Image (spheres, helix red, strand yellow):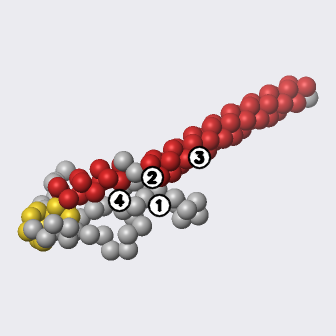
Amino acid sequence: MTAKTPVEARCDHCAQTRPLFLYEPDCGLHLGATGFTCPWCSIEKQPLLCARCWSERKGREDADPQLAAEADAMQKICDANARADARREALKAACDGIADATQQAEGGAR
């Protein structure tokens, strides 16, 4: 694994020339149909921020109660989906077991 070399440029927030890193979203909240999108991904043009400015901005967003409520709602949705998937898999396994037992019983009765 190779580390990315930061680009030396002017920070869009503090206007100082520092090593900058491009933000690459990995939040997983890109579900347009649900209306959930993280604040970073909803920005049309991502700002170039130095590590200090990025950390400050991220800290403000992490402390935002509305974002925390949205994250809780999204977690509940994900948990409910996981439970539904587990129920479907269990039901499928039970149905497959019944089908196998029925086939074996029909095959042995002939």
State the residue in front, 84 or 2.
84
| N-term mark: 3 or 2 | 2
**Alpha-carbon distance for marks 3 and 1?**
14 Å
* Quadrant housing the C terminus: top right
Which of discs 1 and 2 lies nearer the camera? The answer is 2
Residue annotated with mark 1? 37
| Residue 68 % position (x, y) | 45, 47
| Residue 56 % position (x, y) | 24, 54
Q: Amino acid at mark 3?
A: Ile
Residue annotated with mark 2? 67
Residue annotated with mark 4? 25
Q: Amino acid at mark 4?
A: Pro
**Alpha-carbon distance for marks 2 and 4?**
16 Å
Answer yes or no: do the residues labelled 1 and 4 have beta carbons within 8 Å?
A: no
Q: Is residue 78 visible?
A: no
**Is residue 105 toward the left or the right of residue 12 in the image?**
right
**Alpha-carbon distance for marks 1 and 2?**
10 Å
| N-term mark: 2 or 4 | 4
Q: Residues within 10 Å of mark 2 (few under 14, many from 20)?
A: some
| N-term mark: 1 or 2 | 1
Q: Amino acid at mark 1?
A: Thr
What residue is rendered at 20% in x and 67% in y? 13
| Residue 57 % position (x, y) | 28, 57
State the residue in front, 73 or 2.
73
**Alpha-carbon distance for marks 1 and 4?**
11 Å
Residue annotated with mark 3? 77
